[in-house]
Image (cartoon, rainbow, N blue to C red):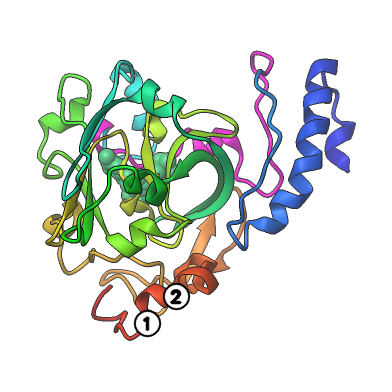
Amino acid sequence: MAKSLEPTPKHLYLSRRALLSGLAAAGSMVATGALVHLGFSRRRAVGARPRVAGATPWEDVTTYNNFYEFGTDKYSPAQRAGSLRTRPWTLSVEGAVRRPRVWDLDTLLASVTLEDRLYRFRCVEGWSMVIPWRGFELGAFLARHDPTSAAKFVELVTLHDPEQMPNQRTDVLDWPYVEGLRIDEARHRLAILAVGLYGDSLPKQNGAPIRLVVPWKYGFKSVKSVVRIRLLEERPRTTWEAAAPDEYGFYANVNPAVPHPRWSQAKERRIGELGKRDTVLFNGYGDEVASLYAGMDLRKDF
Ligand SMILES: Nc1nc2c(c(=O)[nH]1)N[C@H]1C(S)=C(S)[C@@H](COP(=O)(O)O)O[C@H]1N2
Ligand SMILES: [Mo]
């Protein structure tokens, strides 16, 4: 492998060897979204960046972001998200549950087992990445709060604090940012709450300290810096639906056959690659998630 020929400090080489053993497997598991143990090293030398075979470079994952609370261009979040305070952090789980709870995030993290998963990620704008997330399953977490039979939908809400999130002083979106899933989507094992990436903590620009990842849906469903999860009988009104209902639907499943009104969704540019790839229905996770949508007209419920 050419990579191992690069001059590398010895401690990094050792950790890289550990990485490589996990990573050959990881690359092939992108297709299935299977759980992978990537074997990251916990520490890295200053200036050295972790690598994961098959994943988009760490530099791109952490500098090319959408996080409108810090500005609407891709580079503002990495430059401006420093004002976000991620500790102490509370996450409230409420609504149609028998056991509502306001979690201190560190208490929550001490009670879950984190997994590393390499997921494809497709933004509605036409670019894509492959990201090694660290997190835990949303469905299992919701179950701990004992949802009632009235729990048909899940709403997830970002922090609303213009002092920490300066672009909330503008009206580019209705704040706070709100996303939602149907309860069966939220319970699907591929849907995770992420608290890290590349085997490390979550950079603020990527939605620290906790954000949703739903790999078969467009990226905007992946609400960042979540403070509230509410189980609801009615479908929540999501931020992007409210902003442009003809352009952004509630489901937002990746679908090359349903164009955005202003552009095609047939192809995507994988960040770091030249040329374009074909976009795949459900972002390639159809074997696992298509049954959620049996009998639905995906052109109508886009
Ligand atoms: N709160 C909040 N969450 C958000 C957004 C946002 O602007 N605000 N942008 C969404 C969009 S459009 C995308 S593509 C992803 C980007 O996640 P990333 O920066 O980690 O790649 O975050 C999503 N979550
Ligand atoms: Mo996006």
Quadrant position of the C terminus in the picture: bottom left
Q: Quadrant of residue 234?
A: bottom left
Residue 161 or residue 63, whichever sits in front: 161
How far apart, in angstroms, are the residues tagged by discs 1 and 2? 7 Å
The answer to whether residue 9 is above or below residue 277 is above
Q: Is residue 228 left or right of residue 14?
A: left
Looking at the rendered structure, the secondary structure element under dot 2 is: helix
Question: How crowded is the residue under tag 1: few (<14 C-alpha within 10 Å), some, or many (20+)?
Answer: few
Q: Which residue type carries mark 2?
A: Ala
Q: Name the main secondary structure of what is drawn in magenta.
A: loop
* Residue at the disc numbered 1: 294
Q: Quick check: marks 1 and 2 in contact, CB under 8 Å?
A: yes
* Residue at the disc numbered 2: 290
Quadrant position of the N terminus in the picture: top right
Can residue 45 be seen here? The reply is yes
Residue at 34% over, 56% down: 186
Can residue 72 be seen here? The reply is no
Residue range in magenta is 44-70
